[in-house]
Image (cartoon, helix red, strand yellow):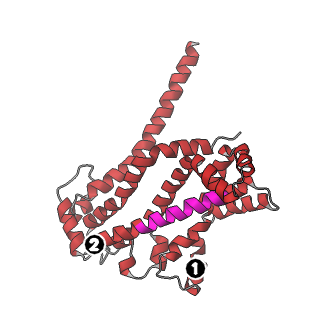
Amino acid sequence: MNNYKFGTYVMRFFVYSLLFFLLILTIVPIWLLIVNATRSTTEIQQGISMLPSTHLFENYRLLISKGLNLPRGFANSLFLAVSSTAITVYFSLLTAYGVVVYEFKGKKLFSNFIVVLVMITMQLSIIGFYQYMSKLGLTDNYASLILPLIANAGSVFFGKQYLEAMVIHDLIDAGRIDGASELGIFHTIMLPLAIPGAVTMGIFAFVASWNNFFTPFILISSIEKYTLPMLVQTLRGDVYRTEYGAIYLGLALTIVPIIIIYAIFSRYIISGIALGAVKE
């Protein structure tokens, strides 16, 4: 019995030590980003420091002096993130609901195809995607960044895994007996039950859209439509004139909405992922 308790304590110590190490790996880069936002370019070039400096307002003045319209960039990023999140969550859950609830020919093949799409990165298909958007006349248009998310394979896969664990077919049958339409059943029965999973999907979609730099950089050319990460990137000029402190401050500003969103909805992430991982 004593050996069992000793082994349990050792295992707990190992697990907690590993979790603490992973916590440090996660927090340190964010802390360094915040610290460098308060340091001058000269201080940053001298090496790493874990202590904040006194150049925060100077870096902010540099950001403003570069002619960057930060409020406009923030508004552009917020519009894209909110629109993309709404489109992604609704249509991904709707698609996942159809795959889970209905039986149709090729259902397994379709499910496997979704998994394959999840593994294909956007960088591999960007040339064809750009040509397609160009033929549709959607380049330099937010529609090219929002509408394709109707078919977000990653969110559909997560929604499918989640709904498989919580769909109650008796409720669906009861709704049909009461005369509800199929869309009515989805909106009035399934969506309220799927709120934890929907919020989890929404957080992931919001963060992905907010941090997305690659696709907007390829498709958006008008500076007044630039998102916040794109505006921060324009600070990079000649290597001798790059203001690293201002760049770090701009990057620090971009993570503020993500932290706020996570702080508000973090409890849904745990419950949503936990339920999505449970199988009957």
Q: Is residue 244 left or right of residue 257?
A: left
Provide the residue designation for mark 2.
242
Dominant secondary structure of the residues highlighted in magenta in the image: helix
Q: In this orientation, which residue lies closer to the viewer: 151 or 248?
A: 151
Q: In this orientation, which residue lies closer to the viewer: 226 or 76?
A: 76
Q: Is residue 154 visible?
A: no
Q: Is residue 28 above or below residue 117?
A: above
How far apart marks 1 and 2 lie (CA) works out to: 30 Å
Q: Residue at x 57, y 48 (%)?
A: 192
Q: Is residue 256 visible?
A: yes
Q: Nearer the viewer, mark 1 or mark 2?
A: 1
Q: Quadrant of the N terminus?
A: top right
Query: Does 182 lie within the magenta span?
Result: no
Q: Residue at x 57, y 16 (%)?
A: 3
Q: Residue at x 24, y 70 (%)?
A: 63
Picture quadrant where residue 213 is located: bottom left
Q: Is residue 123 above or below residue 185?
A: below
Residue type of the residue flagged with mark 1: Ile
Q: Quadrant of the C terminus?
A: top right
Pointer 1 with pointer 2, Cβ within 8 A: no
Residue type of the residue flagged with mark 2: Thr
Residue 56 lies, in percent from the top left, at 20, 59
Secondary structure of the residue carrying numbered label 2: loop
Q: Is residue 42 left or right of residue 229?
A: left
What is the span of residues highlighted in magenta in the rendered image?
A: 79-96
Secondary structure of the residue carrying numbered label 1: helix
Residue 114 lies, in percent from the top left, at 68, 61
Residue 279 lies, in percent from the top left, at 69, 41
Q: Residue at x 19, y 68 (%)?
A: 61
Residue at the far top in the pictured view: 1
Other residues around mark 1 within 10 Å, as few (<14) / some (14–19) / many (≥20): few
Provide the residue designation for mark 1.
127
